[in-house]
């Protein structure tokens, strides 16, 4: 798959949003398990981030973007993703 820089930015944000959704699913699951001792401090901190990706601060989005970048690098390494330069887009 060949992507332009703009398409890559869009993909990065989509993957970041997906990562955030996965984290919400995981953290809610952990927070609701009776056998796991999660402090109320941690649970309350997590709850602040149980919001849509779009509503996160840029700093919080950056955390999810780091995981998206790892996926993108893996796709590039495996030859699944290629970034084309602007002069190649024509």
Image (tube, helix red, strand yellow):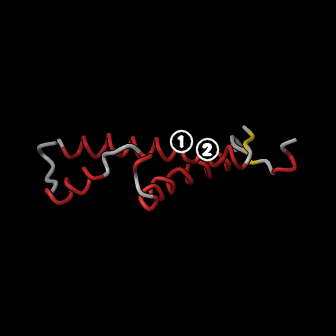
Spatial separation of the CA atoms under disc 2 and disc 1: 6 Å
Image quarter of residue 32: top left
Q: x, y (%) of residue 85?
A: 81, 51
Counting other residues with Cα less than 10 Å from the Cα at mark 1, is it few (<14), some (14-19), or many (20 or more)? some
Foreground residue among 28 and 77:
28
Q: Left or right: 55 with respect to 87? A: left
Q: Which mark is residue 10?
A: 2
The number of numbered badges drawn on the structure is 2
Q: Left or right: 42 with respect to 73? A: left
Residue at position x 24%, y 50% in the image: 47
Residue at position x 46%, y 41% in the image: 18
Image quarter of residue 3: top right
Q: Which mark is residue 14?
A: 1
Counting other residues with Cα less than 10 Å from the Cα at mark 2, is it few (<14), some (14-19), or many (20 or more)? few
Q: Which mark is residue 72?
A: none
Q: x, y (%) of residue 71?
A: 56, 48
Q: Left or right: 38 with respect to 16? A: left
Residue at position x 14%, y 57% in the image: 39
Foreground residue among 65 and 30:
65
Q: Left or right: 44 with respect to 87? A: left
**Quarter of the image with the C terminus in it:** top right
Q: x, y (%) of residue 45?
A: 24, 57
Q: Are marks 2 and 1 in contact (CB under 8 Å)?
A: yes
Secondary structure beneath disc 1?
A: helix
**Quarter of the image with the N terminus in it:** top right
Secondary structure beneath disc 2?
A: helix
Q: x, y (%) of residue 56?
A: 40, 52
Residue at position x 51%, y 54% in the image: 65
């Amino acid at each position: 798959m060949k992507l332009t820089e703009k398409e890559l930015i869009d993909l990065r944000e989509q993957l970041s949003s997906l990562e955030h959704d996965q984290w919400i699913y995981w953290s809610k699951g952990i927070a609701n398990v009776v056998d796991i001792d999660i402090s109320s401090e941690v649970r309350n901190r997590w709850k602040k981030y149980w919001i849509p990706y779009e509503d996160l601060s840029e700093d919080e989005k950056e955390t999810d973007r780091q995981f998206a970048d790892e996926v993108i690098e893996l796709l590039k390494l495996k030859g699944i993703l290629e970034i084309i330069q602007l002069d190649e887009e024509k």
